[in-house]
Amino acid sequence: MVQSKTILKALPHVLKEIDLSFIGPKKQGKVRDYCAKDYQRIQVTTDRQSAFDVNLGFIPFKGTVLNQLSAFWFNKTKKIVDNYMVAIPHPNVIIGAECQSIPVEMIVRGYLSGSTKTSVWTAYEKGERLIYGLKFPEGMKKNQKLSTPILTPTTHGSGPGGHDEKLTRDEIIKRGIVPKKLYEEMEKATLELFEFGSKWCKKQGLILVDTKYEFGLYNGKLTLIDEIHTPDSSRFWIAKTYKERLKKGLEPENFDKEFLRLWYVKRGYSGDGIPPKMSKDLIVDLAQRYIGVYEKITGQKFQAYEYPIEEKIKKSLEKYFAKK
């Protein structure tokens, strides 16, 4: 595990953003900076930390963990569904085929959990039993395993205030957001990816609680894009302590952003107003959790490196495009 002093030493030099003007006009997502060239998407994963649709700060080594984990999973799951990965010229960079994005996030959940306003548990706790068009039985507990994984799709920030909008399967098809046949293909791929990820994580002592997948079309073919089974897109629990902690009414031991969300919720913040500043202890804890889940899933030791890394990223991209 990377020591706290290494993380704190890196903190002033984290990758907050990157200039990609030498390639083309840059766009910026919550965590990634990206641009397009030669029908390819160049994505640089920064160290920005996002939750509640808000940028909360920066976590050393986070960008590398997200990018390298996604590359690991893309290689493992390409037999299930095609993905957009073309090359990894730098640990923080993925070159992907430019796809036509499908405006629906496929969220799959294996457990009744969550702490955000849009989580299934939040709705269930309020007394709702018909959620995302799915009926839930009475008497369930927070963090309880569902009888079968469920799909709770959302649109990309089309709801009020630009937040994701909860939708049912029938609404997506009826409103023509995604054609029926394509949506069924997305459903099938989503459930197969989740099953594969769950089995792999179980072997590594983890529970894959829930996750999201994003898809696009490349030459008319369904293609997995963005990221897969990372601590930003998924939640992971420690398997060996899950049942005991559930019995005691304790939160499962986790390796994901839920720890961060709970830290903020305890301080009265859930996405509105000015967020509290992240403490150094929180930053170290988050960095070690991201690195920890990387090591558990891949079975590889994470190699810390010297910051800053912006110039190394630029040189790797210049070299990549010089070869083409």
Image: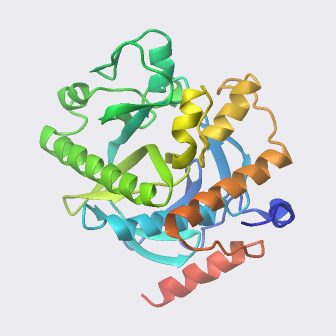
Q: Is residue 123 visible?
A: yes
- Residue at the image point whose x is 67% and y is 32% from the top: 262
- Residue at the image point whose x is 68% and y is 59% from the top: 17
Q: Is residue 119 above or below residue 231?
A: above
Q: Is residue 25 visible?
A: no
Q: Is residue 141 left or right of residue 135?
A: right
* Front in this rendered view, residue 126 or 200: 200
Tell me the quarter of the picture where residue 164 sits.
Answer: top left
Quadrant (top left, top right, bottom left, bottom right) of the N terminus: bottom right
Q: Is residue 315 above or below residue 307?
A: below
Residue 316 in the image: x percent, y percent? 59, 82
* Front in this rendered view, residue 163 or 68: 68
- Residue at the image point whose x is 63% and y is 76% from the top: 313
* Front in this rendered view, residue 278 or 251: 251
Residue 116 in the image: x percent, y percent? 56, 27
Q: Is residue 15 left or right of residue 89?
A: right
Q: Is residue 254 left or right of residue 94?
A: right
